[in-house]
Each structure stands twice: as structure tokens, then as C-alpha cells.
Image: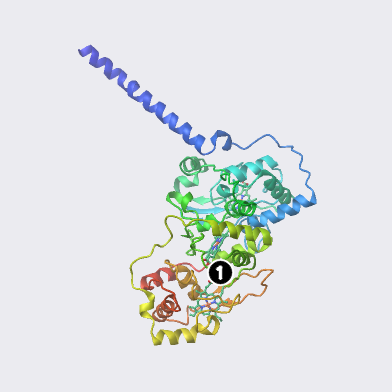
């Protein structure tokens, strides 16, 4: 009896520990496989001397694709040399800096192989180690090799700039790149675009660009814990982390007032009869989508207009007072005095010059931060090839008291058939606390 008990005491850690340890190993193996496998985590060493004879047509295609992927926008400091990196990206955990993509051998991609480049774009792993998902590799994973090679060929032709980006400044464990393995195991699933042979080639092209190089979901998608995009909510609309702007939902219901031609115009020109681009979207149009071919812009529009609404939308409607209950003669006079010169007494604006406020999803959005912000700080539509001298909207920050601001905003949210929830002082305070850029 006593002998049996003491044997058990000696052996129990093994008897219980071994299955637990085995289970942990199995779970780890499964999770590493799910995020792409061990091979995804290593930089390829083969292909270093792959021949990279690029012809002019491939380089030109690469230039076009790089625009759609907005490589220059993210990999250049505003006003600094193109592709030299160093642009800061604020995240909830600290700052990540973009890298040098110019062909400088010491600090850029000068001595990279095409295989290394493809691997970084598809798996988010480079010589630096595991890359942070501020770099849109979760979207770029959908880009086909021929397109990646064209982008690489184009990058190799650009002017080399010697410049090392500042080191990332992330708090705690996030600052340790290897810890990104845990994040990847939890949130990164390589997902090929599903076969959709029944759908038109235009739709497929649109999907390829929107989900891949265009990385539209990066701003328009809802994020969960640790900043990971939630796949079914990737077009549900969201507040962009650290920026205080809302990127609205993109689906056939949210875009019900749009058609393919107008959406394509919005992407290529920055203005459309429904709305004009402002805030971060003005930068996207300026740096990237204005260069889309008409066919590609229409394909993207067709894809967006085919999307079913996400199960949850950003800023679900709350049962608060309706703005239309606050519309009075005084608010009508205030609107007439401050806004009607441009946006019209009837709120219809002037097509492609002053966006309409009537029936405008930005004006009636459940989360009104964009509306409050644009009236406080003003806005400039992007200057594009199709609209080189856009009109801008003046800031009202020093022209309206909070009470007047609430009055005029509720006026536009509750007039001409608009029917949104009334804006409160708390929402104004929240927006005033945001930084201006
Ligand atoms: C939304 C901003 C953003 C866009 C758009 C973007 N990048 Fe990046 N990229 C980054 C950031 C930030 C990093 C650094 C990530 C890190 O340090 O982990 C990065 C890293 C990289 C790396 C890894 C470089 C290295 O030295 O390890 C490559 C390669 C790269 N990007 C290529 C591209 C290309 C090509 C495009 C255009 C098709 C592009 N990126 C578009 C933000 C972006
Ligand atoms: C850097 C963040 C960001 C990225 C990337 C981005 N958007 Fe936006 N987008 C916004 C914001 C913010 C708005 C709201 C401001 C506005 O309407 O101009 C917006 C507005 C829009 C609108 C207008 C919707 C409406 O109801 O008025 C469309 C359409 C749109 N984006 C399409 C796209 C497409 C297509 C892509 C990918 C090529 C994309 N966006 C990428 C931030 C972004
Ligand atoms: C001098 C002309 C002018 C005045 C006055 C003016 N706006 Fe604007 N507004 C514009 C222009 C131009 C844009 C497009 C800016 C852009 O796309 O960045 C705009 C954009 C907007 C938008 C975004 C709509 C969209 O879909 O792009 C809202 C909302 C708005 N204005 C509301 C107001 C309100 C409310 C007032 C009065 C307090 C006002 N504006 C006064 C010219 C004006």
C-alpha cells in the first residue's frame, strides 16, 4: 500500500506531464502549419542568382501595379526621396517605420533576389524577420508571381537612396519581432482567393485588385484583438486606428446610391456626383487610384457593388433623438449663411464641384466623426489628372461655436430626406480631442 503510493508520487509528473506536453507540441505544430508552415517563416536562399532580365513592358507594368499597391505612398516620407522608407505608422502599440525599397544594396533591396521579394510580399517575412502587418502582406499574398516580378523589376530601376529607416518603437513584447509568431499563429491564415469561375472576368479582376494590391480592407475593415482584421467584416467600415477618421462600409447596400461609372470616377478623379474624397481617402486617390485604367477602376467598382453587407456595420444605429426633430428656422438660416453658397439651399451641391449633402452617406453616417471633422478642419479633394484644381472646403473651427456647430450639423443630418441620429456635445468633444493630421 505505502510502496504503491510512493511509486505513484515518483511517477505522476511523467504520467500527467507527458500527455500534456505532447498535446502542447501538437497544438503548436498545427498552429504553425495554419499560419503558413515553417517554410513561410524562413527567407528563401535559393534563387539568389535568378536571371532578372526585365523588358520595358514588364517594367512599365510594374510601375502601374506599384501605384495600385501604393508602395511610394507608404515607403516615402512626405516630401522626401521616393521609396527611401522611414514613414512612421502609429499603431496602438507604438510606431513602425516603412523600409527602404530603393535598389540601394546596403539599405534597400539592391541585393535582394526576386524569390526573396516574392516571399516578403506573400508571407511577410524578410531578412529583418517577421514583418508587422502594418505592411499589407495579408492582402499582397493574393498577388500573382508575374505581377510581383514586374513590381520587383520596376523597383530595381528606381534611383537608389542610401537611408536606413529608424528602428521600430513598439512597447513590450510587440517590440520583439519573433513574438510576431504568436500573433501569426493566432491571426494569420494564408487564404487563396476562392475559385469563382462562374463569375465574369471583370468581377474577378476587380476582386483581385480590391482584395490584393489595392488593400482596401486595411482601412475599411473592422479589426479585433491585437489589430487583426476580422475577415467577414473586412468591408464593414471602421474607425482607422490612431487616425480618427471613419472609412465607411463598402458593399452593395452601403453603396446603393452609386453605380459602376460613378464609383470608377470617384477612384480615378476623386470627385463624383455622390461625394468627393477627403481625409485619408483623398491621399489614396492622389497616390494610387487616380492611376487606375478605366477598365480596372470599373472592375473594382463592379466587385464592390457585388459585395453582400457584412453582418455587423460600424456604428450601429442607437435609439437617440433624430436630427430632423431639431431642424428649425434658425438652423435653416445658419445653414443658409454658412454652407448654402456651395452646397446649395436644397443640399444638392453642384455635381463634381461641391458634393451633395442630401442623401450623402458621409453626412448621415451612424458614427459622425468624418462629418464633424470635415466641418471643423475643412478638407481638400485630391488633385488628380482628371481634376487638377479641386475645390476645397473651408475650416469652421474658428467660425462656429459648439452650439452653432451642433445646430448646423443636425440641420444637414435631418433635412432634405436625411434622417440620422442627432449629434451630441460629447461627440463634438471627442472629435476636438483628435489630433489634426
Ligand atoms: C500601408 C503602408 C504600406 C504599403 C501600402 C506598402 N508597404 Fe511595404 N512596408 C510597410 C511597412 C510599415 C513596412 C515595415 C514593416 C516592418 O518593419 O515589420 C514594410 C515593409 C516592406 C518590405 C520588407 C522590407 C524589408 O527590408 O524587410 C517590402 C519588401 C515591402 N514593404 C514592399 C512593398 C511593396 C512592393 C509595396 C507596394 C506594392 C508596399 N510595400 C506597400 C508599409 C507599407
Ligand atoms: C488609408 C485608408 C484607406 C484606404 C487604404 C482606402 N480607403 Fe476608401 N475611404 C477611407 C476613408 C477615411 C473614407 C471616408 C472619406 C471619404 O469619403 O472620402 C473612404 C471612402 C471611400 C469611398 C466613399 C464611400 C462613400 O460612401 O462615400 C469609397 C468608394 C472608397 N473609400 C473606396 C476605397 C477603395 C476601392 C479602396 C482600395 C483601393 C480604398 N477605399 C482604400 C479610407 C481608406
Ligand atoms: C466655399 C465652399 C464651401 C462651403 C462654404 C462649405 N463647403 Fe462643404 N465642401 C466643399 C467642398 C469643395 C467639398 C469637397 C471637399 C473634399 O472632397 O475634400 C466639401 C465637402 C463637404 C462634406 C463632405 C461631403 C462628401 O461626401 O465629400 C461635408 C459633409 C460638408 N462639406 C459639409 C459642409 C457644411 C455643413 C458646411 C457649412 C457649415 C459646408 N460644408 C460649407 C465646399 C464648401
272 and 89: which is toward the camera: 272
Residue 377 x %, y %: 51, 74
Furthest residue toward front: 198
Mark 1 neighbour density, 10 Å: few (under 14) some (14–19) many (20 or more): many
* Position above or below: 152 against 292: above
x and y percentages locating residue 205 in the rendered image: 63, 52
At x 48%, y 49%, the residue is: 231
Task: Say which residue appears at 38% left-offset and 80% top-offset.
Answer: 403
Q: Give the x, y percent position of residue 362.
A: 49, 69
**Residue 228 seen anywhere in this rendered image of the structure:** no
The answer to whether 29 is drawn above or below residue 13 in the figure is below
Q: Is the CB atom of the residue marked by disc 1 within 8 angstroms of ligand 3's nearest atom?
A: yes
Instruction: Indicate the quadrant where residue 355 lies.
Output: bottom right
Q: Is residue 77 left or right of residue 434?
A: right
Residue farthest toward the left in the current orientation of the protein:
1
- The image shows residue 331, relative to residue 229, as above or below, that is below
User: Is residue 65 rendered to the left or right of residue 236?
Assistant: right
Indicate the quadrant containing the N terminus: top left, top right, bottom left or bottom right: top left
Q: Position of residue 24 (x, y in %)?
A: 41, 30
In front: 423, or 174?
Answer: 423
Residue drawn at x 56%, y 69% as measured from the top left: 278
Count of numbered tags: 1
Quadrant in which residue 74 is drawn: bottom right
Colour pattern: rainbow
On screen, residue 276 versus residue 404, left or right, reads: right
Q: Which residue is mark 1?
A: 278
* Front residue of this view, candidates 300 and 212: 300
Helix, strand or loop at mark 1: loop
Would residue 155 be seen by someone viewing this image from the given angle? yes
Q: Is residue 8 above or below residue 392?
A: above
Amino acid at each position: 500500500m505505502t510502496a504503491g503510493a510512493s511509486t505513484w508520487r515518483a511517477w505522476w509528473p511523467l504520467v500527467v506531464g507527458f500527455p500534456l506536453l505532447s498535446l502542447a507540441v501538437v497544438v503548436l505544430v498545427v498552429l504553425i502549419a495554419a499560419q503558413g508552415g515553417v517554410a513561410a517563416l524562413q527567407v528563401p536562399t535559393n534563387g539568389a542568382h535568378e536571371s532578372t532580365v526585365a523588358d520595358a513592358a514588364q517594367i512599365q507594368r510594374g510601375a502601374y501595379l506599384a501605384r495600385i499597391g501604393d508602395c511610394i505612398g507608404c515607403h516615402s516620407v512626405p516630401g522626401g526621396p521616393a521609396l527611401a522608407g522611414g514613414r512612421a505608422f502609429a499603431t496602438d502599440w507604438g510606431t513602425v517605420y516603412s523600409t527602404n525599397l530603393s535598389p540601394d544594396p546596403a539599405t534597400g533591396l539592391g541585393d535582394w533576389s526576386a524569390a526573396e521579394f516574392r516571399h516578403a510580399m506573400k508571407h511577410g517575412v524578410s531578412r529583418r524577420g517577421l514583418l508587422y502587418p502594418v505592411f499589407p502582406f495579408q492582402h499582397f499574398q493574393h498577388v500573382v508571381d508575374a505581377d510581383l516580378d514586374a513590381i520587383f523589376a520596376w523597383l530595381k530601376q528606381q534611383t537608389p537612396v542610401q537611408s536606413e529607416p529608424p528602428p521600430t518603437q513598439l512597447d513590450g513584447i510587440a517590440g520583439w519581432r519573433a513574438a510576431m509568431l504568436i500573433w501569426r499563429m493566432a491571426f494569420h491564415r494564408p487564404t487563396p482567393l476562392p475559385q469563382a469561375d462562374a463569375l465574369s472576368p471583370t468581377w474577378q479582376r476587380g476582386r483581385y485588385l480590391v482584395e490584393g494590391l489595392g488593400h482596401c480592407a486595411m482601412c475599411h475593415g473592422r479589426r479585433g484583438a491585437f489589430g487583426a482584421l476580422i475577415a467577414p467584416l473586412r468591408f464593414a467600415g471602421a474607425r482607422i486606428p490612431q487616425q480618427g477618421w471613419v472609412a465607411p462600409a463598402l458593399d452593395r447596400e452601403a453603396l446603393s446610391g452609386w453605380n459602376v461609372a460613378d464609383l470608377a470616377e470617384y477612384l480615378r478623379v476623386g470627385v463624383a456626383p455622390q461625394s468627393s474624397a477627403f481625409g485619408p481617402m483623398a491621399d489614396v486617390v492622389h497616390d494610387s487610384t487616380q492611376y487606375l485604367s478605366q477598365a480596372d477602376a470599373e472592375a473594382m467598382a463592379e466587385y464592390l457593388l457585388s459585395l453582400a453587407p457584412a453582418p455587423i456595420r460600424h456604428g450601429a444605429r442607437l435609439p437617440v433623438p433624430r436630427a430632423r426633430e431639431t431642424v428649425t428656422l434658425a438652423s435653416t438660416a445658419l445653414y443658409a449663411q454658412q454652407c448654402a453658397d456651395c452646397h446649395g439651399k436644397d443640399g444638392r451641391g453642384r455635381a463634381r464641384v461641391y458634393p451633395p449633402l442630401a442623401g450623402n452617406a458621409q453626412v448621415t453616417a451612424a458614427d459622425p466623426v468624418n462629418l464633424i471633422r470635415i466641418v471643423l478642419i475643412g478638407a481638400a479633394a485630391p488633385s488628380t489628372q482628371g481634376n487638377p484644381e479641386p475645390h476645397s472646403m473651408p475650416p469652421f473651427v474658428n467660425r462656429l461655436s459648439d452650439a452653432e456647430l451642433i445646430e448646423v450639423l443636425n440641420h444637414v443630418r435631418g433635412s432634405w430626406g436625411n434622417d440620422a441620429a442627432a449629434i451630441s456635445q460629447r461627440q463634438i468633444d471627442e472629435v476636438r480631442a483628435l489630433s489634426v493630421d
